[in-house]
Image: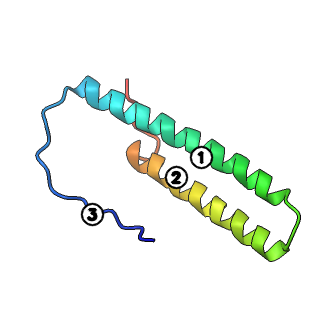
Amino acid sequence: MSNIIPLAPRLKQARSTATEAEERATLAADLIDLIERVREMTEHVAALTGPSLQIQQTAQQLLDAGTSLERAVESLTENGEWVPF
């Protein structure tokens, strides 16, 4: 599995500032929802029984995913300072 997504150069279509803000706000909201879901899944994994090493590794991987999502929100919102409206 590859973690690389090739980004091809493309011509940006002219969009209004309001449209851009709405798209960023929607994306940020979706990312925040994913962060919450990852946190919930981490709690479920932590409550599992079975080999503790596997559970710890799975929980850590979910925590890492949550951290990556948080960084994505920070990048999108310019470290939380960006206000869409």
Point out the tag, 3 or 2, that comes first from the N-terminus: 3
Q: Which quarter of the figure has residue 13?
A: top left
For label 1, count other residues whose C-alpha is less than 10 Å away and answer few (under 14), some (14-19) or many (20+): many
Point out the tag, 1 or 2, that comes first from the N-terminus: 1
Q: Which residue is at a point 49% across and 37% down the rendered structure image?
A: 30
Q: Which quarter of the figure has residue 5?
A: bottom left
Report x, y in % for residue 78: 39, 45
Q: Is residue 28 above or below residue 48?
A: above
Report x, y in % for residue 40: 72, 46
Q: Are marks 1 and 2 in contact (CB under 8 Å)?
A: yes
Q: CA distance from mark 3 to mark 1?
A: 24 Å
Q: CA distance from mark 1 to mark 2?
A: 6 Å
Q: Which residue position is annotated with label 1?
A: 35
Q: Is residue 83 left or right of residue 38?
A: left
Q: Quadrant of the N terminus?
A: bottom left
Point out the tag, 3 or 1, that comes first from the N-terminus: 3
The tag on residue 6 is 3
Report x, y in % for residue 80: 47, 42
For label 2, count other residues whose C-alpha is less than 10 Å away and answer few (under 14), some (14-19) or many (20+): some
The tag on residue 85 is none
